[in-house]
Image (cartoon, grey):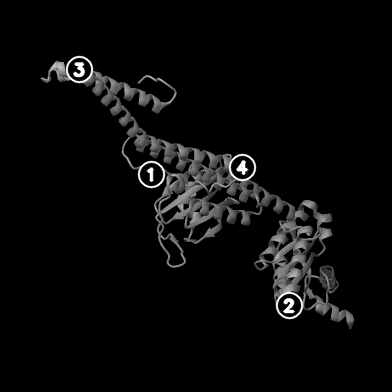
Amino acid sequence: MPRLTRRAFTDLGLWMQALGLGIGVAFPFLLIPLGVPSQFTLRPAFFAACIGAGLLLGAANYALARRVIGLRVVQVSRQMRYVEAVIAQAGYSGDWGVCTPASCHLPVDSADELGEVAASFNGLVTALSTSHEMHRAMSETNRALSEHLELAEFAHTTLRSFLTSGQAQAGAFCVVRDGHLDVLANARLQVAGLSEHPAVLAALSDSAPVQLEVPPGLVVEAVAVSFRPAAVALLPIHFRKIPLGVVVLAFSESPSADTMRILDGFRMPTGVALNNSLAHERFQQLAAVDSLTGAYNRRFGLGRLEEEWARSIRTGAPLGVLAFDLDHFKAVNDTYGHLAGDRVLRETTAAARLALREGDVLVRTGGEEFIVVLPGAGLADVRAVGERIRRNIADLTFAAGQGSLEITVSLGGTTLGDCAAESTQELLGAVDEAMYTSKRNGRNQLTMAAQSMSAAHV
């Protein structure tokens, strides 16, 4: 239909009036074939009455169209302007909670073009809300990822973000470390061998998230009752195509396509942040570990001793310390060379490490000098660990030239409760003196600092 003006309803009114005028003009002529006398139908008064009725009908039709269609168009227009204002305001305030799908949707109460317009408008509002939710979730996740470099904290924070954004009931974060896939964070997901499950291992090489059938034995622990999830999503985490880990999420209901798109969007920033955390961990290890022996270096070890000292003073927990030194090590270097000396250091350190308890800290403080920090160790524990170290090293045999070489160590030990030390320096001084007492008394033995001080006093 050609346009007459720049207003659609004005055009509609003009066309309806034209239609009414045409009907009014044609109506008297249409009555003649029906048997109505022409002298009656062609009278000016009857012509005028028909034209007036046609124009009145056109006006009535225009009023009805304006009433029925115009109000609904105005409603759509008002909602669009409202959404426009909300978007403009939210761009400055950041508050996007004013216009939700529930508050901004139009009622779809007809199965015609107007109903289709309302449905399309509602789809636009929903898409806008979903887009903003994705942007908000990604912003929060990126902020959370950037706040943590420590790998353990990073894994727990990342898993919480995935659980919240995906509305998952349980999950785990598996990370590749030293060639193995380890579970670093777990939320209510209990399954034996999760990091070794074939589907989880296969997901490492996948380029996109996958949903799979729930593996046997996978159970989510809930507050009221444990349940078997309806769906499990595996989200591979890569950095420059290098697999770094897998996020496992369990859902009580299958996630929607929008949810999976949001989770998929998290994978790339998570990969970048995870790579940074792994690099940070490696740098920390390099900074804390002696490159030759694999023991902690002096700076890190003394720092750990200060931490354990403060914890012991605060809580009253026992704290033990050992010091040991390889006997006649200078002669090994002078006779067999520094390469042989390095091999002796590496193997004696490995033997000493086998004698330690879980949580003990082995520190190389000098060339052939070591200390061991033993959190929670009483006098008997220190003596037992020291004797194990002495025996393990004494049992070693090294090939040297045409013969063999045996190495022994002299040790000194004490605990915070058995040594009247007021600082870590005094504590180390006490075990150092006990170690030199062992050397003076023939080497290859352990002397406890309390015994050493008593002997010196006598």
What separation in Å lies between label 1 and label 3 (alpha carbons)? 52 Å
Q: Amino acid at mark 2?
A: Leu
* Residue found farthest to the left: 35
Spot occupied by residue 327 in the image (x, y as percentages of width and height): 81, 65
Q: Amino acid at mark 4?
A: Tyr
Q: Which residue is mark 2?
A: 379
Q: Secondary structure at mark 2?
A: helix
Q: Secondary structure at mark 1?
A: loop
Spot occupied by residue 369 in the image (x, y as percentages of width and height): 80, 62
What separation in Å lies between label 1 and label 4 (alpha carbons)? 29 Å
- 153 up-or-down from 39: above or below: below
Q: Report the residue at 55% width, 55% height from top.
A: 160
Going from N to C along the chain, the mark reached first, 1 or 4, is 4
Q: Amino acid at mark 3?
A: Arg
Residue mark closest to the camera, 2 vs 1: 1
Q: Report the residue at 69% width, 73% height from top.
A: 376
Residue 155 makes an appearance in the image: yes
Q: Residues within 10 Å of mark 3 (few under 14, many from 20)?
A: few
Q: Are marks 1 and 4 in contact (CB under 8 Å)?
A: no
Q: Amino acid at mark 1?
A: Pro
Going from N to C along the chain, the mark reached first, 3 or 2, is 3
Going from N to C along the chain, the mark reached first, 2 or 1, is 1
Spot occupied by residue 298 in the image (x, y as percentages of width and height): 79, 59
Q: Which residue is mark 1?
A: 107
Q: Which residue is mark 3?
A: 43
Q: Secondary structure at mark 4?
A: helix
Going from N to C along the chain, the mark reached first, 3 or 4, is 3
Nearest to the observer: residue 293 or residue 148: 148
Residue mark closest to the camera, 1 vs 3: 3
Residue 206 makes an appearance in the image: no
- 268 up-or-down from 400: above or below: above
Does residue 258 appear left or right of residue 450 in this picture?
left
